[in-house]
Image: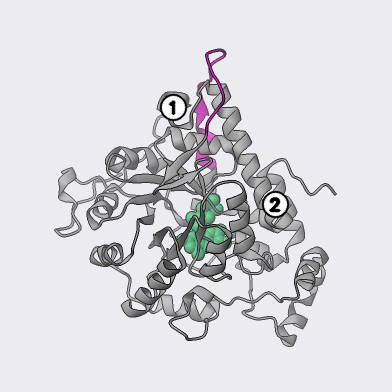
Amino acid sequence: MNPWFETVAEAQRRAKKRLPKSVYGALIAGSERGQTIEDNQKAFTELGFAPHVAGPIGERDQSTTVLGQQLSMPVLISPTGVQAVHPDGEVAVARAAAARGIAMGLSSFASKPIEEVVAANPATFFQLYWCGSKDQILQRMARANAAGAVGLILTLDWSFSHGRDWGSPVIPEKLDLRTMLKFAPQTLARPRWLATYVRSGRIPDLTAPNMAVGDGPAPGFFGAYGEWMGTQAPDWADVRWVCAHWDGPVLLKGVMRVDDALRAVDAGVAAISVSNHGGNNLDGTPAAIRALPVLADAVGSQIEVLLDGGIRRGSDVVKAVALGARAVLIGRAYLWGLAANGQAGVENVLDILRGGIDSALLGLRKTRISDVDRSDVVVPAGFELALGVPETAGAASASGERAEAAPA
Ligand SMILES: Cc1cc2nc3c(=O)[nH]c(=O)nc-3n(C[C@H](O)[C@H](O)[C@H](O)COP(=O)(O)O)c2cc1C
C-alpha cells in the first residue's frame, strides 16, 4: 500500500485499521454524548467561502509568527499525550513539525521528556496542568524553562468527566505478561502496530516523564491523573502566579468566554486559545469556532488569539484565520498521521493542511494569510456566539469582583 494519504480522513481510516481498538478509542476521546466533539467539526461545515474568479496574485505566503516564533504556516501542534500510538511518540511529532517549519506543543502527560523534544524541535511550548502543590508545579516549570521551552501552554479546562455513551477504552498502565495476555486479541489483530514496537525494542507504557519532580521517579499516567484530580482547581490569582513565575510567554488554552478572556489579559497571559479541549471536557460546550469572532474582537488587539478544535483541512485553518485567529492548533489530525505512518505521516498531514491553505488563498485571491478577513467567509445568521459578555467590559478584572455573565 502507498504510505502516502491524500486527506486527514484517510489518515484516520488507516489509524483505525492499524491501532489496537483501545488505543484508537483513546484518541477519539470525547465525553458524555459527544455533542461538543461533533459540533467542533460540524461548525466548520456551516461556514462557506466567497471566492473571486480573477485578480492579481503572486507567490502565496502562509508564514506568520506566534508568541515570537516564526512559523511557515499558521498551524501549531496541540499538546496531547500520544503514548502507545508510536514508539517515537512526541519526538516523531516534534521532528515532523520542525521539518515543516512549525511549533510543537508538548503535554505534561506526554510519553517523552521535554529535553528530547526540544532537541528535536527548538520551537517547543510546554503544556502545564494545575496538578500537585505549587512547589511541584514550580519545579516542573523550572525544568521546562531550563530545557529551553519557548513558551508555556497553561491548560485549565478540565472537569474529570469520564462517561462516554459509546464506551470508554480500557487501557493498561504497563504491558506486563498478564496484561499482554489479556490484550493479546486486540494487539495481535494489529500486526503492523505491534511490529513497529517490536522493531523499536520497546513496549508501550504510560509513564509521564515530565510529571516527575526533582530527581524523583516519573509517575505513571494514572498516578499523575489521580494527583491532578486531588488538586484544588486554580483561581485567577494562580494564573497570575504562573505568568509571574514562567520565564517567557504564557498561552492560556481553553478560553470560551469574554469575561474569562478579559481576566486572562489582566492576569498577564500573552495569548489564549479559544478551545473546548477538542470536545473532551464539558460536553455541551459549543464549537470553539463559534466563540472565536467575539473573543478576537474583545481581546485580539491586546494579546494573540488562537483556536483549536475540529481542524481537519487547510480550508478550516483559513476559515479560523478569517474569523480572527492568528493561528490554529491541531490535535487529532496529527495523531491520525502519526498512527498511520509515524513521523512521515505527521509530515503528510502538515502537507495536506499547507496545500489546502494554499488552494483557499488562491481561490480567495489573497497573497498573504494575513490578508484573509471576514469578507472572505460566509457566516450564517446565529453562528457567532457571545459567551460571558460582561455588562460593562471593564468590569471583568482578575483583581476585582466577578462580572455578571450576560446570557449567550
Ligand atoms: C487523545 C488526546 C489527548 C489530549 N491531551 C491533551 C493534553 O494532555 N493537554 C492539553 O492541553 N490538551 C490535550 N488534548 C486536547 C488537544 O490539545 C486539543 O485541544 C484538541 O485535540 C483539539 O481538537 P482536535 O483534536 O479536533 O484538533 C488532547 C486531545 C486528544 C484528542
Q: Which residues are magenta?
A: 42-61
In the image, 313 versus 269, the foreground residue is 269
Residue lying at 43% horizontally and 72% vertically, measured from the top left: 143
Q: Residues within 10 Å of mark 1 (few under 14, many from 20)?
A: some
Name the mark on residue 187.
none
Is 371 rendered above or below residue 125? above
- Label 1 SS: helix
Q: Is residue 332 left or right of residue 302?
A: right
Q: Which residue is mark 1?
A: 371
Q: Residue 131 location in percent, x, y?
A: 39, 74
What residue type is disc 2 on?
Gly
Residue 374 figure quarter? top left
132 in magenta: no
Residue lying at 75% horizontally and 53% vertically, measured from the top left: 14
Residue lying at 37% horizontally and 79% vertically, measured from the top left: 136
Q: Which residue is mark 2?
A: 345
In the image, 382 versus 94, the foreground residue is 94
Q: Residue 320 location in percent, x, y?
A: 46, 38
- Label 2 SS: helix
